[in-house]
Amino acid sequence: MTAQPASIRPAPLIGPDDIPYLPRGVRLAHDRVRGIRVLQAPERAMQLDAIGDAILGELDGARPLSAIVSGLAARYNAPEDQIAGDVRDFLTGLIERRMVFVRTP
Amino acid sequence: MKDQQHQPRDLDGNPVTPGLPMAMLAEVTHRCPLACPYCSNPVELTRAAQELTADDWGRVFRQAADLGVLQVHVSGGEPGARRDLAQIVTHARDARLYVNLITSGIGITRERLEELDRAGVDHVQLSLQGIRPDMADRISGHPGSWDKKMAFAAWVQEIGFPLTINAVVHRQNLERLPEMIALAEQLGARRIEVATVQFHGWADLNRKALMPTREQAAFARQVVNDARIRLRGRMVIDYVPADHHAVYPKACMGGWGSTGLNVAPDGTVLPCHAAQSIPWMRFENVRDTPLGEIWHGSDSFNAFRGTGWMPEPCQSCARKTVDFGGCRCQAMALAGDARATDPVCSLSPFHAQVVARAEDDARADTADLVYRRMRKGE
């Protein structure tokens, strides 16, 4: 996951107060043959890097995006602004593919 | 099946390096209550008595998972024609596979769908032959299919399965594509696959009745583009265009023997569902040979791996690792040679001829269909 210039970032599909979650039929899994983490979804298995896996591991269906970002910023000792943009873009990509759902409180 | 060095080689003897498969299509039966004239099953259908048992499928799923397969598409025919479908699904989940059920929705009651939910079906893909009874029932050759499908879709929603609608489009129903997309939305589908008929097997017998016109292909592209913008974040639209009107061929199966495999009802293992249309090719069976050995060592899977086997114009083409020369079965059907450049490619010497024939078929003044049926008395 690399930060992209703002100009080519897709319009976000999630705000700080929204609660992202993995819907039914989407789950994190370990690929024992290749030794990688994958996101299993309808007719698609997506390879995850360590960052993607860490983000999706935070989706508990209870905490909003802002809390997830604060947690990740503290854990990786990184600026919250940058983490916020990266996480929002990563999740927006998955929301576009209907692999992450969002609940608005 | 393997040479002495156990080095996998393509059909010209060039060494190849097999990767690992991600997905397996499990055609658990060819039996089906529908008779769609573009069915992807071979024209020679397998009878019930030759089908693998549920326990056979269990063994195949465990071998597939050991080989690297992550997802199984349980399909047919109509998989619901197997009374032991829930057992088959249970075996797949026990092997830790993600289970996609590919169904027409006909012949699966609400009770059976609940049983399949308990067995662990992860996702349901429901086929759509058209919109409203007049089109859906005529194309599927099954009176009442529309009403049954709509009831099935409601159960899918109530139980909560993720749903994909698979709309197969052709000259007789392309005008209704916007309605198909609207229906998928209304049914709460996460995804719709809009797939133009691929003219192999049964569909090839119906070219004159189903071939879309160039104008229709352009219309479909526009409808899909507009809907993708409108439905961003709400529904995914996957689109398989009419490749007779394309400039370059599709990367069939993402490359022969690269990421997917297909197990037919009798256990025959195929690099793609249409591979048996290549008359000289011989295929192994999971009743005799473990899946891993077939994947890594069989002549059929190795035949078109890599790029060494490719003739010109593919061999010197920059796109040879993008589209892998296109579809081998289409090359067989249209150029009479499975190794040839897919004739839908604009660089193929057969291209002009293929386009002319497609345009001729698209103008044909017939709507009569040859329906998919098992021949009686076999």
Image (cartoon, coloured by chain):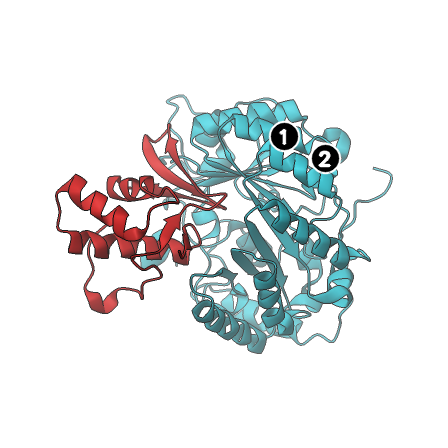
Chain colours: A red, B cyan
Does residue B30 appear in the picture of this structure? no
Which part of the image, by quadrant, shows the C terminus of chain B? top right
Residue A15 locus on image (x, y percent): 31, 60
Can you tell which mark lies on residue A92?
Answer: none
Verify CB contact (< 8 Å) between mark 1 and mark 2: yes
Q: Amino acid at mark 2?
A: Arg
Q: Given the image, on which type of amino acid does mark 1 rest?
A: Ile
Which residue is under mark 1? B88
Residue at (66, 42) in percent of width and height:
B76
Q: Relative to residue B194, is residue B114 depicted above or below?
A: above
Q: Position of residue B224 (x, y in %)?
A: 50, 69
Crowding near pointer 2: few (<14 within 10 Å), some, many (20+)? many
Tell me the distance, in whole angstroms, between the alpha carbons under discs 1 and 2.
Answer: 9 Å
- In the displayed image of the protein, which residue is found farthest to the right? B377
Categorize mark 1 by other alpha carbons within 10 Å: few (<14), some (14-19), many (20+): many
Q: Chain of mark 2?
A: B
Task: Please state which of residues A75 and B254 is positioned toward the viewer in this rendering.
Answer: A75
Residue under the image location 47 percent in, 66 percent down: B231
Tell me the quarter of the picture where residue B276 sits: top right
Apparent side of residue B300 relative to residue B170 in the rendered image (left or right): left
Viewer-proximal residue, B288 or B123? B123
User: Which comes sooner in the sequence, label 1 or label 2?
Assistant: 2
Residue located beneath label 2 in the image = B82
The x, y position of residue B26, in whole percent, is: 59, 37
Residue at 79% x, 45% y is B374
**Toward the viewer: B160 or B324?**
B160
Q: Secondary structure at mark 2?
A: loop
Occupied quadrant, residue B244: bottom right
Give the image location of residue B127, x and y in percent: 64, 54
Give left or right: position of B362 versus B222. right
